[in-house]
Image (cartoon, rainbow, N blue to C red):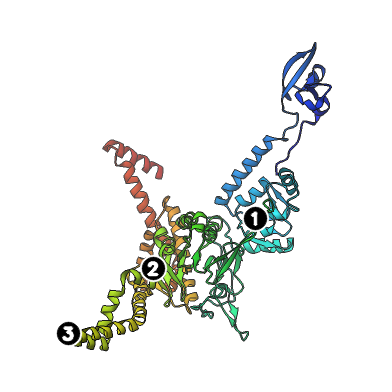
Amino acid sequence: GPRSGLGEEKKPLVNVAWKDAANPAAGYEYLYLSEPDYATLPAGTVLADKLTVGGEARYRLDAVIGKLHGIGVENLRGSGMIAGETSRAYEDIFTLSYVTGRSVGIGAYLNRLGQRVIQKDEGPMILTGYSALNKLLGRDVYSSQDQLGGPQIMLPNGIAHMGVPNDQAGMEAVVRWLSYTPETVHHFAPARPTADPVDRLVDFKPTATPYDPRNFLAGTVDADGRPLRGFFDAGSFTEYHAQWGKSVVIGRARLGGQPVGVIAVETRMTETRIPADPANPASSEMVLQQAGQVWFPDSAFKTAQALSDFNHGERLPVFIFANWRGFSGGTRDMFGEVLKYGAYIVDALRKHDAPVFVYIPPHGELRGGSWVVVDPTINEEMMEMYAECNSRGGILEPPGICDIKFRKPDLLKLMARNDPVLRELSAKIGSLTMVADIEACQAQIDARQEALLPLYLQVAYEFADLHDRPGRMKAKGVIREVVPWETSRTYFYWRLKRRLAEAKAQAAFSQLAARKITRAEVSGKLSALATASGIDWEDDRAIVELMETSSAAIESAGRELAFGAVSAQLETLIAPLDAKARADLLAFLQSRVK
């Protein structure tokens, strides 16, 4: 925290004006300096009013300024300046704090302002020491700084991204994190050589039953000890914020050596623990159950925080393995600001400056508001959405939509068309004339309908489910492609490599044109180049190889775009000028060119 101190040179000179000199318990009126002592002080080191009491000249102290600079509020101003610089630094460069010892006050805030935090087990982050809090509370409530800001507090609440036992592990974690980052914020992180081939299949396949999503990210082993390789390069996945917002898994990994950010969804039930407050004897630890495939306030905030970290200082492409049924909307979670944190996800995606791939995995589903906050229209320049063959997407789940759009009367009509027994009974009842016979036949119809109702309800669910399948998503243009899981690693490697190559070309073209060139403009030039070369524009691998072997043609295309952009700007500038002014400007430009 900021250094604090007192005007030590004035301590021996201070006198006390008691209300009753014989009874100090009555209190004092003011502190003062005698006239001789006041005369010895440098000008401007105290603020005082001159008084005369009983013939004695006194200088009543209003403020002590001190001879030394850096003993009070001026240090707080310095801390504020550091805080502002750290906050700006997070947006401008890569920031990471390693908490190796105690961080107090502004020191703790600086860690959070830099956002990314690795905390050692013996490195508490606190605002006030436990002994000072005990004095404030009037009793010994806290026994250590760890109770206030140790890893058991800062890891579950999301302040610290990762905990480490010692400095050796801490430095390894720092270096590993740096390995995912680019040279500057204007570049993408470089790909490193990998022994894991990009054209292999993804062995672990998500199931319809709950599973650990880390298995398809990093790979695992089966019951016989055989390796099941995951989506990303072997050994490249590192999880962060593992103890916070457990219904979402976030981390960093590599695909074909290229660093990327990762967001996946926990399908199993998880627990969130809220510790008891030692200062409140009536409080107790709370354990909250959180269902899988649902965004809760903490996991929604975690998702938004991860996207912000991936973007600021890291500029990582992001893979979102989207498998959410929606946001938690109960009273507790609405009070816990789930609506606000869900909106933060949209804010983070809108600002993201690297490709974002949203992929619905096998047996995954994306519905309602959870689709809305990751829809590519949020950031069409950067975002793309894909679905696996066995995934689903829609507004409501089949039972929900059938309660509204496929009710019992519709089911009865479906039965009447498809069940031969009902058709026979319906034909029979029309020919009956006796009331008793009609009632008996109707009873048979009712009994048959009741027996068939559960079966036809499943038929209705299947019919509704047909509206949620990838084929309809593709036909409606809400996803770019249906990608089989087994070959998804290869597909997305080339798609990622292409998007990064296009982004680099876009940056180079923008620099030439002195304005932002859109992705559509870049695609137009590259598409023309692909057509001239007889290459399918939709073949990502072929386009990547074309760009790698056609640098001169791409540079020429960039200069054409730049010329067009500058010409348009010049035309806009000279439009208001009269003929003479235009002629003078043209002559001036020609002279400068010569």
Mark 1: few/some/many CA within 10 Å (<14, 14-19, 20+): few
CA distance separating discs 1 and 3: 71 Å
Mark 2 vs 3, N-terminal side: 2
Q: Quadrant of residue 469?
A: bottom left
Mark 2 vs mark 3, foreground winner is 3
Residue at the spot of label 1: 283
Residue at the spot of label 3: 430
Image position of 568 (left or right of 54): left
Q: Position of residue 388 (x, y in %)?
A: 43, 75
Residue at the spot of label 2: 396
Mark 3: few/some/many CA within 10 Å (<14, 14-19, 20+): few
Residue at horizontal 80 percent and vertical 25 percent from the top: 14
Residue at horizontal 33 percent and vertical 49 percent from the top: 568
Image position of 283 (left or right of 303): right
- Outermost residue on the top side: it is 55
Q: Amino acid at mark 2?
A: Leu
Q: Amino acid at mark 3?
A: Gly
Mark 1 vs 3, N-terminal side: 1
Tally of marks: 3
Q: Is residue 409 visible?
A: yes
Mark 1 vs mark 2, foreground winner is 1
Q: Quadrant of residue 4?
A: top right
Q: Quadrant of the C terminus?
A: top left
Q: Quadrant of the N terminus?
A: top right
CA distance separating discs 2 and 3: 40 Å
Reply above or below: 57 against 439.
above
Q: Quadrant of residue 552?
A: bottom left
Nearer to the camera, 305 or 439? 439
Reply above or below: 396 against 49.
below
Q: Amino acid at mark 1?
A: Ser
Q: Position of residue 457 (x, y in %)?
A: 35, 78
Q: Secondary structure at mark 1?
A: loop
